[in-house]
Amino acid sequence: MKLQYLLLAAAGLGLFTACESEEPSLVKAEYKKPTTFVLNTPQFANGVYELKNANAVNLTFSQPDYGYSAVCDYTVELSSTEDFKYSAVISSVYHECDIDVNANDFAMALCTTYSNAAKAALEENPEADVNPWLDQEDVDQAIAASADGTIPVYVRINAKVSNPNVTGSEITSNAIKLNTVPYFALPEVELPAQMYMIGQFCGWDWANAAEMVPVHSNPDKFWCIRYVKAGEGFKFNFAKEWNGTEFGGNATLVSNVEGVTMSEADGNITVDKDGWYIFGTSTAISGRDYVHTVTIFPANVYVFGDTNGGSWEAKPEWLFTIPADGEGDFVSPALAANGELRLCIVPTTLAGEAWAGDWWHTEFIFFDGKIAYRGTGGDQERVQAVAGQVCTLNFVTGKATLK
């Protein structure tokens, strides 16, 4: 019968390797590229690591021989298989050779690597007898199906010199195998709170990417207006960076612009006609995966309410003119009456369905010469306008005027 240990209690009995992390000062040392890096096998590696009942997993290792006692960054990598094909790296960075890895972080990485391996197997063979870990029930089933009621995990350490001026110092340790009783520790998957559009229209520079506007009462949707050229790629992401969650040609693509087609090109999205478009993204959650839809609409912007004579419908006569190129302004008709200026888009499918719901879900106005989007907020401060005035909008610079 296998012994089961609380990890912190067992940690004190494990092998310990001292690891001083001080750069040489009085002694001149010459850097060398290490060839070995040893992660110690815990004394009780054949025991069972019950992650839910532990605070930490203790690991000890010897510092790679850099020719001196260097300050190093150490990260812990876990895998469901010995080849580390679908591994997960714990985010914490350590600087000592005797570390206590937070048990919840360890469990999260373990869930990630097993889920990634299962998803890959299903992509290769949809009939494969595997199950990505989506909740505690899935983890319990995996434990019950195992030969001894435990789940194996392979662990190794990645090391590099902390000093950024030292390059090429990366080295990976040997791997050890631990028997675990895991639990489902992954955080709940949530819809993104932000969305950005990037592409050749902004030089693929995140600093100039378009920040999309959340759609009121539709937490799955965002929109923006941008000019793109035919054949020039673009894509989207929740964050203003390349972090692996970006999406483009892998999304479902829907064109609601007559005569315009969207296509996948090298992982990006392209259109086959230059022009201004409303770009809309919709995101759904399937298990722990995001499913994206990208939709385009004509870049129609409307004047609503008092200043158009009292109409709260998207009437063609109250459309802004669309600039001929990517630099110009959208220009409204001369306002018909005094009153509150209300502006909006009303993206509508070719079948006549309102993509965003009521018009105020995509309402906006401007203050101090700058466009202000309602987004998910309440009614905006009212802006008074006078009959005969004309409104101009620039969706790239965000500037606006009323003259």
Image (spheres, grey):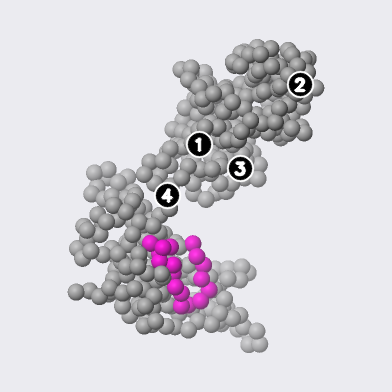
Q: Which residues are magenta?
A: 91-107
Residue type pointed to by label 2: Ala
Q: Does 94 appear in magenta? A: yes
Mark 4 or mark 3, earlier in chain: 4
Residue 321 shows up from this direction: no
Residue indicated by mark 3? 204
Between the residue at mark 1 and the residue at mark 3, the CA separation in whole angstroms equals: 26 Å
Residue type pointed to by label 4: Glu
Task: State which mark lies toward you, 4 or 3.
Answer: 4
Mark 1 or mark 2, earlier in chain: 1
Q: Secondary structure at mark 3?
A: loop
Between the residue at mark 1 and the residue at mark 2, the CA separation in whole angstroms equals: 32 Å
Q: Are marks 1 and 3 in contact (CB under 8 Å)?
A: no
**Location of residue 179 (image quadrant):** bottom left
Residue indicated by mark 4? 188
> What mark, if any, has residue 385 been given in the picture?
2
Mark 1 or mark 3, earlier in chain: 3
The spot of residue 253 in percent (x, y) is 46, 30
Task: State which mark lies toward you, 2 or 3.
Answer: 2
Q: Residue furthest bottom?
A: 27
Left or right position of 323 against 97? right
